[in-house]
Amino acid sequence: MDEVDKIILLTLRQLGTDVEEDVASLADLPTKAFVEGAARCINTINGNDEMPLSLPGSMAARFRVGTTLATACQDLGYGSNIGYNTFLYSNEDDCRQLLMWLIERLPKETTSTTGAETLGQEAMLQRAITAEIDKQLSCPWIPPAFHRDGLCWSNNRTAWHLISRRGVRSFRSTTLFTSEMDAANTARAAYETTNQQTIPQQRSVATSSLASILARNSRLLASERAREEELTAAGRDPALPNEDFVRQKRTTTRRTISAKVKAALFNDAKQEVDMAKFLAKFSGIELGKMSMFRAKHKLQFAKEDEAAVAATKTVTDEELKQQREDELSALQGEVEDLESSLQAMRDNLASLQSTAEALAEQTARMQEENEALTKEQKVRKRVLDLLPNAEENMQLLKDKIDEVAAKLAALAERWEEHRVALIKEYRDLKVAAANKNSEARKQAESIQELRSQAKQIIADAKQKEQLFQQLVQDYERMNKDILRSSYTSRILEIVKSIDKQKREIQKILVETRGLQKDLGLLEGKIERTFTVAEEEIFKESKANPAARLAYKHLANLHAECGRLIDVVKSTGTVAREIRDLEDQIEVEQRKDTQKNLDRISADLKALKTENKQLAEQLRKK
Amino acid sequence: MMEAFASVEDAAAQQLVHGVIDGVCGQDPPSFSGIATGLSLQQWTSTVNTLTQAIEKQFGRENGTEEVVKALEQSGLPSAKGAVVRACLDARSNDLHKALIRKACAVGEACVVDFDWDVRLAVSSSSMHTLKIPLVHLTLTLQQPSGRREDVHVELSEEELDAFLSSLNVANKRVQALSA
């Protein structure tokens, strides 16, 4: 019984029933767990969730749950007597019998899915491809125009495959215009609120909105990553604003590019373009500004006009008019004269300026010549002075030259000292700069390395998790297998012992049959002996009166013996009946009738109180 | 050329100028039916062309907005509409700036403007039962100087793809060295 109980409890636990760990046999199983287990079994057999898993609080509802379970069991074909009492007031035997019957009817586990997990990813892919091609080959041919977007859904819209190229667009992105989110720029904000169109409305985007959005997003991501990398390589924190760095970078980039462009242009132009010719192009341009001279002139005129107006104010109107006209003509003439003279003066000035420039140039040249000549003259004079005693002077000069040479050598030595020190310093600084640079690069590299390591570790962790889960599954399966094998071995043992018992029973039966045969033989012998004896004595008794008495005694003896045998037989049957009764008593005792009775009476009381409450509620209404 | 533009209402004019700017920035040019300007088709074409040319040629200069307006006024734009054009250009200066930089960067004869890729697995061939060779199918969209776009399809095996990527890396390094 112990083994059976263990198997039943294990099965119940596997089905998800809440059985406490310390429950070792069905005798300890509480009613709640028993009802839940039976309901789970029935649900699993029927493949639905119809049976309630727990007993409700109210007595009437409990009764209903018990009845539902009992009818479900009867519908499944449970042969023995079953009712609500089986569940509500369970005894160990009924419980065991019912659970064993239910567990036998549980559907067998499907084991076909276990093979796939052990295969590699590549094999899985291969298998998927094969399945896909098989499916496509088995599909009937449909004109491509009938496929919606060239897609075919399968497995209840969880998987799809392409059937034709219809509806498949190439990945073409276009420029998207989006908001700049800059409230300070009012012109932009006005455009964004009135004229800017949403992305789906932008005209060229209509067919490629998804591609454009994806491309834009990835472009932003890539530029952001490049910026971060550059900043980290430069030893800055990318999270902080780095405006000065960006500005600096921009200016240096511009400078390099402009330098390169300039160099390229210069190389092209160098052969033919003369700078003078280039400048000559600009010589014809008039300057817009007023020259000093013209400004002064204008001011003078204005003052004269004012004086004239003040003088004529006292004269009468006609005269005034005449005067004015005269004055105007005179003044105009004057103005013209002045202008022409001004023009002449200007021309004159220009020519004078040019001559002045030419003269200045000449002067400078002559001065230079003059200086050169004076120098030459001085040297010649010295040489002529030295000529009279040339030997001596030459010696002197030689000495001086030696002296100067020695001085130079000394200076060179000193310079060398300085130079060595300076070169050393320069080298040190160079090395330090290189170190700094390489350190930054090293750090960037190490950051990169760490990132990749982190990624790898995450991937490893994922893989290990998967492995762990698979192992857990394996473990569960193996655990079950071990139990099952142990159970099968035990079952085999039990079957063996049952065989042995059967054989013994057979032996006993054979013995009993032999005894019965002996008994029959003996009975026949007695019968025969009795009839022979009776005949003999009956023959004798006709002649001999003593034999008559003997015959009487014989008949009596026979009858008494027969009665004795009957009594012995009846004693056997009575003893058997007694044993049966004893068995029955034992069974009844095991059913805990007293306890169940107590429970039933308690439930009855509860039911009665519930009824009373319901009646009261009804009355209140 | 731009006299007809004077008769267009301010709101429609704004829409039109923005449409032209969209065209300069790489989207489709504005459509005649899309904007209710009241211009004849001929007027429309000449207006759009003048606007496009003025923006493309003049905006890149220093103080580009003023240069564009000046060029338009030379071809007959009334000063009242000058303000409209100026407002539009101010609003879109960032977009135009980017578009002009992109144009300036496209130095060669044809340049790549877009690309697409997918991976294929050759399962078997006419001579082999099983192959299992992954192939990358790369589509490069090139823009010709004439503005025409054409696709170039390349199929690369794994080694070819590696070689291609390494040559691209070398090119990228050269560019980086130029900007650093």
Image (tube, coloured by chain):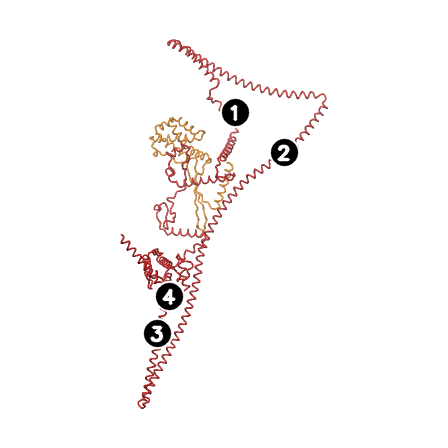
Chain colours: A red, B orange
Q: Nearer the viewer, mark 4 or mark 2?
A: 4
Task: Determine whether the residue tagged by mark 4 lies in a helix, strand or loop.
Answer: helix
In the rendered view, would you say A59 is above or below A328?
below
Residue B171 appears anywhere in the view: no
Q: Residue B67 carries which label?
A: none
**Circle 1 chain:** A
Q: Earlier in the sequence, mark 1 or mark 2?
A: 1
Please name whichever residue, A577 or A180, is drawn nearer the observer in this view of the structure: A577
Using the numbered discs, state the Cα–Cα distance from disc 1 to disc 4 in whole angstroms: 130 Å
* On-image quarter of the N terminus of chain B: top left
The crowd level at tag 3 (other Cα within 10 Å; few <14, some 14-19, many 20+) is few
Do discs 4 and 2 belong to a common subunit? yes
In the figure, is residue A371 to the left or right of A172?
right
Residue B174 lies, in percent from the top left, at: 51, 38
Cβ atoms under marks 1 and 4 closer than 8 Å: no
Q: Earlier in the sequence, mark 1 or mark 3?
A: 1
Q: Which of marks 4 and 2 is nearer the N terminus?
A: 2
**Circle 2 chain:** A
| Residue occupied by mark 4 | A590
Cβ atoms under marks 1 and 2 closer than 8 Å: no
Query: What's under tag 2, amino acid-wise?
Result: Arg
| Residue occupied by mark 2 | A419
Do discs 4 and 3 belong to a common subunit? yes
In the rendered view, would you say A438 is above or below A552?
above
Q: Earlier in the sequence, mark 1 or mark 4?
A: 1
Q: Nearer the viewer, mark 1 or mark 4?
A: 4
| Residue occupied by mark 1 | A276
Task: Determine whether the residue tagged by mark 3 lies in a helix, strand or loop.
Answer: helix
Q: Residue A574 carries which label?
A: 3
Using the numbered discs, state the Cα–Cα distance from disc 2 to disc 3 in whole angstroms: 138 Å
The crowd level at tag 4 (other Cα within 10 Å; few <14, some 14-19, many 20+) is few
